[in-house]
Image (cartoon, rainbow, N blue to C red):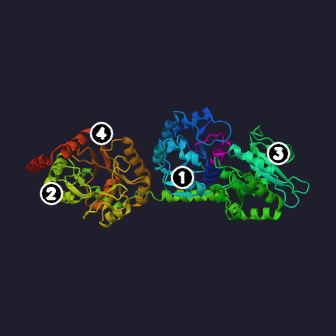
């Protein structure tokens, strides 16, 4: 998924961010397809015909190529302005619908989004993806990241990433400051010199060729030309010449003075790669507004010596003496560094030699190796769905029962339902088994387990435990109370120590105490079941997000009423085979059917308020006694 236009057989060749992202996507997808993966590039397009073709392919279910090549899906028509593209283009209204339809029509292992800032095709894809999501952030600027208008929404969308990659360490640090998470650095690759490119001349006696490629902000070119005017042009000076690759050419803001006209040549943007192969020195003079680390990397890979402003990404690529630096906007130091290289062939050769290690690992094969490793690690975290065949065979002869896995009694601080009333109501609702999950307390579940036989309802002893600051988690089939306030990992470990099952309730409901996506990923291997439907979740998209998470990690899906009043029981039913113990329960749950009933939220919430907040303590006590007596008589 790329935010930038993709037309014909490749990406838009616009320089700058669009070009770097397009180049990375084009090279890595081609190699992945060559290695046997089925690959689909999804991008906006400037062609209405391409968009219509994609929509027909979605309806026909024919998105992937059958010949092992990369398929392309154009999901929205966009118009791009000339010149460097630094932000994702605006999206037409129908793009989200097309992306959602596309993602609903194909089964993907990995959805790899590039620069998923909103609004863009990748950000829409993250909202609808049921695949494992990998995101790459290339070289966004501080200004672009810091001024995200909908930062909270972007944060939530980024939370759906299962792996985060950054093209440079500087990018990882920038993203980490604004959108905390773990970012792995995978440096982009660089293309070899094009066939037929003029090789650079040897240093001795030949003019040193200085190159500037106009992929940074406009002020960088002006700084370069000002520095050239400070170079020694006398008869005894070392010979040099300069080339500027620019689609714009010289302008009134970047005039060529008389003394430079014989030495500086402007060429079109299409000649950038050929000029990189012929240049001795590449100048990257950004002041930080729009740096182009991909350009600097391409220059290094082509054998040019970079002279760059002291920006984090540029420093990262020129460490260990692989280039010379100057402070941003410092024209005198830039001129001095260029003069050193022009006058000293030995220095030029030495600095070029320092970049040899980076050139050796600059190929796209290395990048693709890294991507396959990341994809493999993410996919490996999916749960095994085979289960235990022997237990499954045993369960086939068991009767089907209805089960509710999430409810509370008056042993919870926010519930007034006596254990006896809960059991009687469960029986009357036709439930065969229930999990009593009081908040940070197990006494209600133990009491229910002692009395359940007289009501004909099986009870799973459980507890909904509040962790230190990472939300709640339910332990099923417990024997001892787990104290609140442990870390999420410690709570999970204690559930496992007791031989219980880890059940994550309402995992993405921001109105409950929930573990965020990053914390959930740290325990995903130990999660036995995930609550994909909770009728007390006020916003349906939170349940949908839980369903997507369970599907992509292949975690066993479950549901519960989360009832705090007896009337809420039965609003969710899991139809499953009867079971004995946690292992049979989990195997039975794999093949269960979840039946839901909506529309009761306001009703049960009002009842909960009346029972716990609006009724005086003495009245609550008398009411409890009457309800217990009625339950016993029934």
- Residue 554: image location, x then y, percent: 41, 53
Name the front one of labels 4 and 3: 3
- Asked whether the beta carbons under mark 1 and mark 2 sit within 8 Å of each other, the answer is no
Q: Is residue 623 left or right of residue 115?
A: left
The stretch in magenta equals 1-21
Relative to 53, is 131 on the left or the right?
left
Residue at the limit of the structure toward the right, as seen here: 235
State the SS at label 4: loop
> What is the count of numbered marks?
4
Q: Which one is earlier in the sequence, the residue at label 4 or at label 3?
A: 3
Queried whether the magenta region covers residue 44, the answer comes back as: no
Q: Is residue 10 highlighted in magenta?
A: yes
Element class at badge 1:
helix
Q: Which badge, 3 or 2, is on the more N-terminal residue? A: 3
- CB contact under 8 Å: marks 1 and 3: no
**Sequence-first disc among 4 and 1:** 1
Residue at position x 75%, y 63% in the image? 351
* Label 3 Cα crowd, 10 Å radius (few <14 / some 14-19 / many 20+): some
> Nearest the camera: 625 or 47?
625
In the picture, the quarter occupied by the N terminus is: top right
Q: CA distance from mark 1 to mark 2?
A: 55 Å
Q: Which residue is mark 3?
A: 265
Which disc number belongs to residue 175? 1
Pointer 4 residue: 598
Q: Comparing marks 4 and 1, which lies closer to the viewer?
A: 1
x, y percent for residue 363: 67, 58
Q: Position of residue 251 (x, y in %)?
A: 77, 38
Separation (CA) of disc 4 from disc 3:
71 Å
The structure residue drawn at horizontal position 23% and vertical position 40%, both measured from the top left corner, is 606
**Which one is in front, 1 or 230?**
230
Of labels 1 and 3, earlier in sequence is: 1
């Amino acid at each position: 998924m790329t935010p930038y236009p993709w037309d014909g057989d490749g990406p838009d060749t616009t320089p700058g961010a669009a070009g770097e992202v397009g180049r990375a996507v084009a090279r890595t997808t081609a190699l992945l397809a060559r290695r046997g993966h089925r690959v689909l590039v999804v991008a906006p397009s400037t062609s209405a015909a391409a968009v219509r073709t994609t929509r027909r392919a979605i309806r026909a279910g024919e998105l992937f190529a059958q010949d092992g090549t990369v398929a392309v899906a154009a999901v929205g028509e966009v118009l791009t302005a000339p010149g460097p593209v630094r932000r994702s283009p605006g999206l037409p209204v129908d793009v989200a619908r097309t992306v959602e339809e596309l993602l609903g029509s194909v089964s993907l292992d990995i959805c790899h989004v590039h620069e998923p800032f909103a609004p863009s095709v990748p950000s829409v894809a993250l909202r609808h993806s049921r695949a494992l999501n990998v995101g790459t952030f290339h070289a966004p600027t501080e200004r672009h990241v810091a001024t995200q208008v909908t930062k909270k929404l972007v944060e939530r969308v980024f939370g759906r990433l299962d792996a985060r990659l950054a093209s440079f360490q500087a990018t990882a640090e920038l993203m980490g400051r604004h959108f905390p998470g773990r970012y792995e650095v995978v440096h982009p690759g660089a293309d070899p010199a094009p066939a037929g490119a003029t090789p650079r001349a040897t240093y001795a006696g030949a003019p040193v060729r200085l190159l500037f490629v106009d992929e940074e902000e406009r002020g960088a070119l002006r700084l370069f030309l000002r520095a050239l005017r400070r170079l020694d042009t006398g008869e005894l000076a070392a010979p040099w010449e300069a080339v500027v690759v620019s689609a714009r050419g010289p302008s009134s803001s970047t005039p060529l003075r008389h003394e430079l006209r014989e030495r500086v040549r402007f060429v079109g943007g299409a000649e950038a790669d050929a000029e990189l192969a012929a240049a001795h020195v590449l100048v990257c003079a950004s002041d930080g507004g729009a740096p182009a680390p991909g350009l600097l990397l391409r220059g290094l890979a082509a054998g040019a010596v970079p002279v760059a402003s002291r920006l984090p990404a540029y420093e990262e690529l020129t460490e260990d003496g692989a280039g010379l630096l100057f402070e941003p906007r410092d024209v005198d130091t830039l001129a001095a560094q260029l003069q050193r290289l022009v006058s000293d062939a030995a220095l030029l050769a030495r600095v070029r030699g320092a970049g040899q290690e980076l050139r050796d690992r600059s190929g796209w094969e290395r990048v693709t190796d890294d991507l396959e490793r990341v994809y493999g690690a993410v996919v490996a975290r999916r749960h095994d769905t085979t289960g235990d065949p022997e237990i499954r065979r045993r369960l086939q002869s068991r009767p089907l029962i209805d089960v509710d896995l999430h409810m509370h009694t008056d042993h919870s601080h926010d519930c007034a339902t006596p254990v006896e009333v809960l059991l009687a109501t469960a029986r009357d609702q036709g439930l065969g088994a229930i999990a009593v999950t009081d908040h940070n307390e197990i006494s209600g579940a133990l009491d229910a387990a002692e009395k359940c036989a007289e009501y004909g309802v099986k009870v799973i002893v459980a507890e909904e435990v509040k962790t230190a600051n990472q939300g709640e988690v339910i332990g099923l089939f417990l024997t001892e109370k787990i104290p609140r306030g442990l870390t999420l990992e410690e709570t999970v470990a204690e559930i496992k120590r007791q031989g219980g099952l880890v059940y994550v309730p309402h995992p993405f409901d921001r109105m409950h105490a929930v573990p965020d996506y990053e914390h959930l990923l740290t325990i995903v291997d130990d999660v036995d079941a995930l609550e994909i439907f909770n009728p007390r979740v006020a916003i349906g998209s939170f349940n949908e997000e839980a369903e997507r998470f369970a599907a992509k990690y292949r975690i066993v899906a479950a549901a519960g009423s989360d009832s705090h009043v007896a009337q809420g029981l039965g609003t969710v039913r899991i139809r499953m085979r009867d079971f004995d113990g946690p292992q049979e329960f989990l195997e039975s749950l794999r093949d269960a059917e979840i039946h839901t009933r909506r529309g009761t939220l306001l009703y049960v919430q009002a009842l909960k308020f009346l029972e716990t907040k609006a009724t005086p303590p003495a009245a609550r006590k008398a009411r409890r006694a009457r309800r217990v007596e009625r339950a016993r008589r029934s």
